[in-house]
Image (cartoon, rainbow, N blue to C red):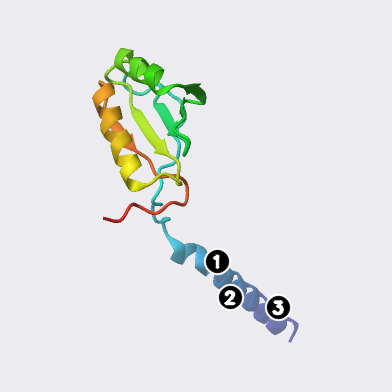
Amino acid sequence: MNLAYQSLLLLVLFVSEAVALLPLFLRGTPTPALHSPIPSPALVDGGPPLWLVETPQGQWSVNGDRLSSTDLGLFLQRRKPLQRVHYLPSDALSFEKVSRSMRWLKKQSQAPVVLELPFGARPFSP
């Protein structure tokens, strides 16, 4: 009888473990998020990427350093064309303001400008 209890106990533990691990197997790979994670500043193509942030007050910062729009335009014109440029607008900006800023940035920069959404923001609807 002692062997029967041990076998039953082992069977119960095995089944409990299998049931507890089932969500890990069913979860699979995580679904991609709507926002892009900020990459590490490793050298990519022409150097580390530029992160341009625009506040609702119209202030700009490049990788954390504040610049006026005039200085930002000059700065972008002098940068390497292979250096990636990411535009991260404030979620308080209107669609029209973001669109105008994107057009302006694309005119100023030799490199492509990528629109990044703030964390948790939804894509703009037409």
The label on residue 21 is: 1
Mark nearer the viewer, 2 or 3: 2
In the picture, the quarter occupied by the C terminus is bottom left
Report crowding for label 2: few under 14, some 14 to 19, many 20 or more residues within 10 A (C-alpha): few
| Residue depicted at x 40% and y 44% | 117
| Residue depicted at x 47% and y 47% | 119
Query: For this view, does 65 lie left or right of residue 100?
Result: right
- What secondary structure is marked by label 1? helix
Q: Which residue is mark 3?
A: 6
Mark nearer the viewer, 2 or 1: 1
Mark 3: amino acid: Gln
- What secondary structure is marked by label 2? helix
| Residue depicted at x 39% and y 56% | 31
Mark nearer the viewer, 3 or 1: 1
In the picture, the quarter occupied by the N terminus is bottom right
Q: Which residue is mark 2?
A: 15
- Determine which quarter of the picture holds residue 49: top left
Query: For this view, does 72 lie left or right of residue 6?
Result: left
Q: Are the residues flagged by discs 3 and 1 in contact, CB closer than 8 Å?
A: no
Query: For this view, does 60 lie left or right of residue 13?
Result: left
